[in-house]
Image: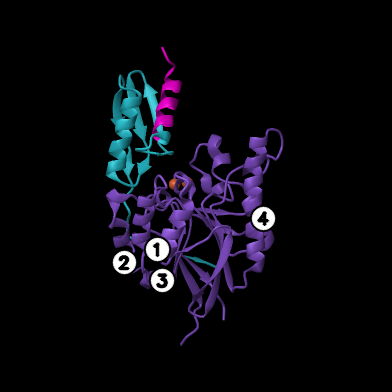
Amino acid sequence: MSTLTEVRIAAVGDIHLGEDVRGEYRKRLEGIEERADVLMLAGDLTRHGTLEEGRVVADELRDLPIPVVAVLGNHDYHSDLQHEIAGELRDAGVMVLDDDGVVVECGGTKLGVVGGKGFGGGFAGKCASEFGEREIKDFVAHTRYIAESWKMALKETQADRRVVLSHYSPIKETLEGEPLEIYPFLGSYLLAEAVDTAGADLILHGHAHKGTEKGLTPGGIRVRNVALPVLGKAYAVYCLECGE
Amino acid sequence: MEAPQYVAARIQQALAEDARTHELGIHVDVRGDQLFLRGQVSGNDQRVRLGEVAHEAAPDLKMHNEIKVVVVNEPGEDEHLD
Ligand SMILES: [Fe+2]
Ligand SMILES: [Fe+2]
């Protein structure tokens, strides 16, 4: 067998499925094994985070011929059923990350995937800080906790290539097109800082439907906003070189 | 009379919070007695529901539902990151 020289990552976020579109997304996944080695889903898989919608998503992803890794998004948390939805997805064979990591075997390559929903707070120089009212401190502390978890998970993940999968954005470049006023609700630079510190080859996120596909962290890690309305197609495919 | 900005904000809030829609990214504009909805959603039913909720929130305005349904196209070209 020849050694894989690259890993092909199919990625999409914000598919926002419901009963009325059952079966349609699955059609678009036909033949994905020809195009990609792994599928990554960047959250907002449902509209309202109901169990019914969670089951539609699970059915669309069930028994795909390639490994599937997913994180949830804010919509998937709306009905406080995120654990149940994650359970449905896991039963369908999807690896669901919750501020932790997993290693996927792609040919001869070990691909580490670390991430979770992420959270907001804004971007360096124009962001919330842990100061003042309890509610603001809790908001920022939540993002800080997530960033810290990702950093630890990245450091612990032994792999040839490492990808971070998030719903919220780590940088503002991929938000371009969204109103500036809502940037603090779309992501946080703390996520980028954590990943820059621990190191990774690619960061995937969704959430910003009107944003832009391509950006870069301050440390030079490629960032891709894979929200379905941004991509305008069923999924994007990113190929990471793997060397020997 | 309520300022159009507040009317638009109230409609947007309704689209986000109404259990039938929960749609956050819809652009709402009010001009005189005209109401414009713009944005992208994942299915036609959702577009119709958004129109209904917006209409209920401001029944006196003439609504133009310009929301588009995202067409899920075939995956295109790969990007090689080197
Ligand atoms: Fe979304
Ligand atoms: Fe989102």
Q: CA distance from mark 4 to mark 2?
A: 37 Å
Percent position of residue A141, x then y: 66, 45
Residue B8 in the magenta stretch? The answer is: yes
Contact flag, marks 1 and 4 (Cβ < 8 Å): no
Q: CA distance from mark 3 to mark 2?
A: 11 Å
User: What residue does disc 4 label?
Assistant: A148
| Quarter of the rendering containing residue A242 | bottom right
User: What residue does disc 2 label?
Assistant: A30
Q: Is residue A75 left or right of residue B58?
A: right
Looking at the rendered image, the disc whose residue lies closer to the viewer, 1 or 4, is 4
Contact flag, marks 1 and 2 (Cβ < 8 Å): no
Same subunit: marks 3 and 2: yes
Q: Is residue A188 left or right of residue B10?
A: right
Q: Callout 4: 10 Å neighbours few (<14), some, many (20+)?
A: some
Is tag 4's residue or tag 3's residue first in the polypeptide sequence?
3
Q: Chain of mark 3?
A: A
Q: CA distance from mark 1 to mark 4?
A: 35 Å
Percent position of residue A97, x then y: 53, 60
Q: CA distance from mark 1 to mark 2?
A: 16 Å
Q: Which mark is residue B77?
A: 1
Looking at the rendered image, the disc whose residue lies closer to the viewer, 1 or 2, is 2
Q: Callout 1: 10 Å neighbours few (<14), some, many (20+)?
A: few
Q: Chain of mark 1?
A: B
Q: Chain of mark 2?
A: A
Residue A124 in the magenta stretch? The answer is: no
Is tag 3's residue or tag 2's residue first in the polypeptide sequence?
2
Q: Which residues are magenta?
A: B1-15
Note the chain letter of the purple one: A
